[in-house]
Every structure is written in structure tokens, then in C-alpha cells.
Image (cartoon, coloured by chain):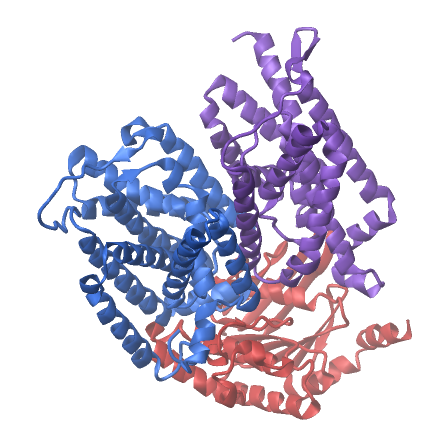
Amino acid sequence: MIGSLNFSDQSTRLLLGLLILLMLAPLMAGDYMLSIMITVLLQAYLGMSWNVMMGFAGQFSLGHALYVGLGAYASGALFVHFGTPPWLGAVAGMGVSVAFASMIGALGFRFKVMGVYFALLTIAFAEFTRVLFDHWGWVGASSGLFLPVSNRSHDDIWLLRGSASMFYYVILAMVAGGFLFSRALLRRRIGFYWQAIRENEDAADALGIDVFRLKMIAVIISAAMTSLGGMFIAFFNNNLYPESIFSMHRSIELILGTIIGGIGTLFGPILGAVVLTALGEGLTILGEKIGIDGIKQIAYGACMMAILILKPGGLWPWLRHRLGLDGGAK
Amino acid sequence: MTAPMLSVDNLGKSFRGLRAVNAVTFQVARGDIVALIGPNGAGKTTTFNLIAGALPPSDGRVLLDGHDVTGMGQAAICRQGVGRTFQIVKPFAGLTVEENVMVGALRHDGGHVEKARAASRKILDLLELGDKATHPAQSLTLPDRKRLEVARALATRPKLLLLDEVMAGLRPVECDRMVAILQGLNKESGLTILLIEHVMRAVMALSDHVVVLHHGEKIAEGTPAEVTSHPKVLECYLGEEHV
Amino acid sequence: MDASFFMNVTSAGLLTGLVYGLMALGLSVIFGVMRVVNFAHGDMMVVAMYAAFLMFTKLGVEPVMALPVVAGGLFVLGYLLQRFLINRFLGVTEHIQFLLLLSIAIIITNAMLMVFGPDARNIQLEASFESYSVGPLILDKVRVIAAFTAGGVAALLWAFFRYTTTGTAIRACADNPIGARVVGLNVEQLYAITFGIGTACVGAAGCLLLLLVDVHPHLSSDYTLLGFIIVILGGLGSLGGALLGGILVGLSEALSGALIAPSLKSMFSFGLLILVLLLRPQGILGKKP
């Protein structure tokens, strides 16, 4: 749990080791491997962002694609129309996302929309926005927004134009930052308050915690983090369609890794992203060998079901126990 | 003259026409231990929830230290210095025992986590839960969960502590320990306590003053000895047994 | 925009809405009794649509005639799923339940993709080209058939819960599962039957919907969402509410599709959902918790 002595040593050591390994990866990995690692890290990052809201504060969102989309479109459209650097665009995206999150949170929490209903409210806002973007000409409507791809000889990190390994390091830095930020939140007063709200809102209220305000903060932080991930997606993919960026499938994909890895834990989102991507890729290769096309997704569903039945708390709490890290890294 | 710690004035609550609490008036003097007793369904827990701000009263006022706190909401009233426990315990099941108490303690010392941890340890030791500090709260037995409720409420450093049936389910020895702990807190730090209790042994031992509710109304108050010999009180308790 | 056009659109929306209502009934029954949110609802509907499609193309059985068979098949599917899988997950946190149903949905959708491919399929009945004229109104024959059959199935369901012993027992389970166990009801069995009834409703709705729309595997998530919108509009666990919600969504889709833009119709449904969630979270006909 959070409170034991070895906490900082063990998790820091684990993280450092992992980081060094990951820093060296592009030197060894081929293009295919690198793209897979970017996928894993992106999923880990988005999962972490969602984890702040759901895992820490217990507020179930099924519409996080909304913030991905807002972040992606804000930075993408500003870049396309005005040449605004993505990092500034991301700030705009975060602003818009925070505005939406505040609205959804304020409405949902004030009107006491809870649990599954709150999740449906978040889906509704995401879908609503998706259709809106489908009809908004300035961002390309349903035919999509395309970022100019110029062949540059060097990586421009300020404009995020360049090679796959540059994107790899960017997303790696985002994951590391997201991890440290999550850990800092979890270890501070706010983290304790969130967990109290997650476990029992009424008891938290009786201890003098401003439940509404803390839930709002969780939603806002989570949305801002998620929209930064959206910016990355926009500049990595170079094309945006409302149909895919705001889709419920993305919202679901975004949370899968964290739930499989262990909700409310720090390593869960990372582990979950690795396991799910490895599973997906492994099954694709297997599917090609066997020669049956659709088998991959079916097996994917079956594996998910198996994990849920066998380890409903997620893989990381179980692995942590097996590694003898109990009471150590959360 | 200083205002009483708690002053309940003509408090009432209706649930869809059902009158659960009606015109209840009583006071809790600073440094006193007051018990709220009465048969099941007398409106004790509702009265508690009205005082603690968990429910808004339909009418009447609640004054804390002379300040009107009526309808302020549970969190705000806690910040005014009222700690409460729940009759049906509500531990933060996924956190450790210590972390449960820390959540209460974090309001003080600028939210410093290690200071809150140290404060929580002290409170847990006091309530004899120290050796279970790192256990998950969901592993506790019911009597321990009751103690945890008290510990958590104490951690908010209240001036008024509201205890809802914390003796229920405790064995007589454990009950006496709890009585001693509460007496100690009252004597040493001058903590004012209002408690709902069914265990008469504890009520008699602890309280300076007893308020009796029946059918949502106050039917008697006085010292434990006065109240237990009060004809109306006898009638409502004995009458209930005769039915 | 003349009045008769408006009335035709309205009546078509109303009739389609009844079929939507039947689909949502299944979701509502399952949630009302077990508090399980069936995220594989739309997928089960697509299974039913393909079953009806096969019955027609291979055996020449029209969807309305195939309905009892398809509904029966889906009852068995739902019964077994609840009995052997979902039952283990009652009472666990919502997101785990959600993921379980989602994994079922992934498996079903992709199995459909493997078997039928991604292309849309439809069936042509003689009735597809016929219509009734009632005064200025022109009603598609298939739409009328689908709506009336949906209403009939809903009425049967209502009678089942109202007048049969099993129906009463299921209502008892919904009110108080512990009490139901105490008085000796076989709660697991009743839950499995309830899930079966829920999926049978979807099965019936799928057969009828095949008369109105083309089927393809990716319809599933749209219909799952549509089901949620309807059920929340009407009030979860309320039979009348599901039908009312279905009609409202049918109307809003038809009107926004005809008067504004077809591609905007889902936005209006979601807008409706947001409004109801905020103003009356228990749904239009739902009881306060």
C-alpha cells in the first residue's frame, strides 16, 4: 500500500531501470517494433490519465475519447490554419477539455448522476461532440483534417515533425511524466482524499472533505492529461476523423489496459498496455499462421474474459504480490 | 456566560409526511458527556444526522458554540469541529487502517502526510488498533471497525464528538475499555461527547446527562439516575417489552 | 414542408419507435432485476438479425414467422450466459461487469464478422413495397407489421410478469433478492430466466428490425447505445418507460432526420439523453430511488 517504508526506493528503482531500458530501445528496435512500442506507451499514457479520475477518485468515465478528440483537434486545427506549434495548441486543447470536463462534472455531480449513469452521461457528451465535429467545416467535418507532412531531414521537436524515434521519445517522456505526476498526486493529501471518496463518499463527507470540489479536480486533471495525449495522436497520425477519434471504441480501448493492469495502481496502466498490445500482436501473428482472419479479435475477447475471471483486481496487484513487492510499489 | 457546546432548538424532520423527529430541544454543555437514548425507531439516529448535517432539518435550529450551523452540510459542520461515527460502519475498505485515520487527520498540519501518519498512529494506539495499522480496513472484525470509526472521527480533532452506537457488538470487557477511553479523552482534553447508546451499562458509567427520545419527541432528560426512574421512561421501555 | 409529409414522418418514427422500445425492454428487464448493464445488448440483437436473415434466405421463413424460433434461441443463449458466466459477476463493481459484457460483445461481433463479413445485407419481402393509405397518411406495410408485432410481444411480456407465478417470483427477486432467497425461491434459476427473457426480447426486436434496416456486424454498438438512451429516457426497470422511450427516440430520429439532416439524428438522441439524465435521472416513468 502507500504507506510503507520502501515505497519510494522500490518504485523509483523499478521505474529507473525500466526507463533506461526504454531509452535505449530505439537503438535496437526496428521500425515495426518501434511503432508497437509507441502504441504501448500511448495506451499507457492515456490509461494513466483515465486512472486519475476512475482509479484514484472512483468516477467512472466511458467518454474519454471526448478529451482525446478535443486535444487532437485543437492542436491539429490550430497548426493547419495558423501554424501554431503543437505544444501551444495542446495548451488550447487542454483549456477546451477542462471547460468540457468542468461542465460534465458540475452537471453530473450537482445532479447526483452516479456510477453507470455518470458513465453514460460521459458517453453522451462524447457522441454529441463527435456528431458536431462531423458537421464542422473549419475542422474538415466528416472528411477529416490532414496535417501537412513535410519531409524533413531533421527532427523538429517544437513543431513535432520528424521521425518515429522522435515520437517515441516524446511519448516516453509523457509516460514518465504522467507516472511521476500520478505518483505525486497519490502520495499527497489529495490522493488520500480521492481514495476516501472512491471507497465511501458519505464517510469522506463526514470527515470534512469537500467531495464536490475534489471530484471536480480529478475530472479536470484527467481531462487535461488525456487531451495532451490527443495532441500526440494528431501529430503522430497526421490525420483526424471525428468518426474514429471521438468514437466509443476509443473510449473503451483507452480504459481496457488500466482495468486489466490494475485500476487505481501506478504500474497498472503500463502493465496493462504491454499485456494487451502483446496479446493483440501475438494473436495477429498467430492468426496469420493459422490463416483464419477474424480469430484474433475473438481470442482477444476470450483472453480479456479469462483475466476478468481469474484476476478481477487486475494483473499488477497480483504480479506485485508474486514479486514480493507487497507494501512496496503501488 | 458562554454558550453551550451544542444547542438543539425545536428540531424537526419529516420524511414524506412521516414525522421522524418533532420539536426536540436539548443542550450539551462544554465538556459534558451526554447520552441520547430511547427505544428503536425513536428518532435518535435521525436527530444525529440533523445535528451532523447529513440531513437538512425540516424545522428548528442547531447551534454549535453559539453559531448557527443549521443546514450547513456534513463536511462544513465537520470543519466547524464536529466529528461523527456511523451506526452502520463505513470504513474506506480498500485503504489500510492507518490510511483510514489519516484521511481524517490530513485536515490539520497543512495536510502534511507524515505528520498525519504520526497523529494517526497515536490515535490508533489509544484505541488499541495500533498493531493492525497496516492491515486493510476490510479485514477488520466488526468491533474493530467500530473502533476505527471512533479513531477516524477523533483524527479530525473535533470539539464535539458524535458517537452512534459504538458499543453495540462489543463484549462487556471491550465495552468497559471503550468507556475508559472515552472518559480519558473527556477528562484530559475536555472533549464534549454526545452519544447514542443502547448499552445501558455504558450510558450509566459515562454520561453526565441523558436525553430520552420516544416516537421522535423528547420525553425526559436529567441525570442517569433521574431518567431511569422517570415514570414516562419506564413506561416506554417496559411498555415496549410487554407488547 | 407540408402537413402530410410531416405526419408521414411522425407516424413512421412512432412505428419504428415501438420496435426500438421492444429492444430496450430487454435491457430494462435485465437491469431492473439484476442491476446488470448489458453492454452486449446490441450484439445480441445483431445475432438475432442474422438468424432471421438466414431463416429467410435459406428456408424462406419470413421474419415475423421466424420470431418465435429466434427469440427462443436467444432465450437459451441468455439463460446459459447468465447461468455459467455473468452470475459470478453479480455484485462486483460496475466497471468489471462492464468489461465482462464488453468481452462477450467483442467475441460476438467478431464471430459475426467472420461468418458474414462486413457487408450490409437486407431482405426483400413482397410486403416491403406495399403500403397502407389512411386518409392523408401513407404507412409502409412492413413498418406497421413490425410495430404491431412489437406491441404484441411487449403485451405478452407484461402479462407474464403480472399473471404468472414465475413472473411474480422474478419481481420478488428484483425487489428483494435476499428475501426471495429466504422464502425459498431459486434465485439463480430466476436470474437466468430473466436474462433469457431479456435476450429473447432483443431477439424478437432483431427479427422485426430486419424488416426495416440492413444488417451488418458493426450495427451492434450503435444499438447498444440506442438501447441505453431509450431505457434511461423512459426509466430503467420500467416496462412502459422502455416503450415510451423507444417511441420518443423513434420520433426524434425520424423528425431530425427528415427536417434537419439524417446524419444529425443521433446527436438529437444524445441531447435528449443528456437532458433527461440531468433533469430527471430516474427517467420519465421511473420511480425515485
| Residue C181: image location, x then y, percent | 80, 63
Residue B127: name its quadrant.
bottom right
Q: Position of residue B4 (x, y in %)?
A: 54, 73
Residue, x 72% and y 22% (percent of image)? C145
Residue at 70% x, 6% y: name it: C135
Q: Nearer the viewer, residue C10 or B243?
A: C10
Up-down relation of residue B45 to residue C118 (above or below): below
Q: Position of residue B187 (x, y in %)?
A: 52, 89
Q: Residue at x 68, y 29 (%)?
A: C56
Name above or below for residue C169 compared with residue B82.
above
Q: Nearer the viewer, residue A59 or C66?
A: C66
Apparent side of residue A269 relative to residue C195 in the rendered image (left or right): left
**Chain painted in blue in the figure:** A
Quick check: can you spot residue B67?
A: no
Chain the render paints purple: C
Whether residue A161 appears in this view of the structure is yes
Chain that the image shows in red = B
In screen coordinates, is B9 left or right of A170?
A: right
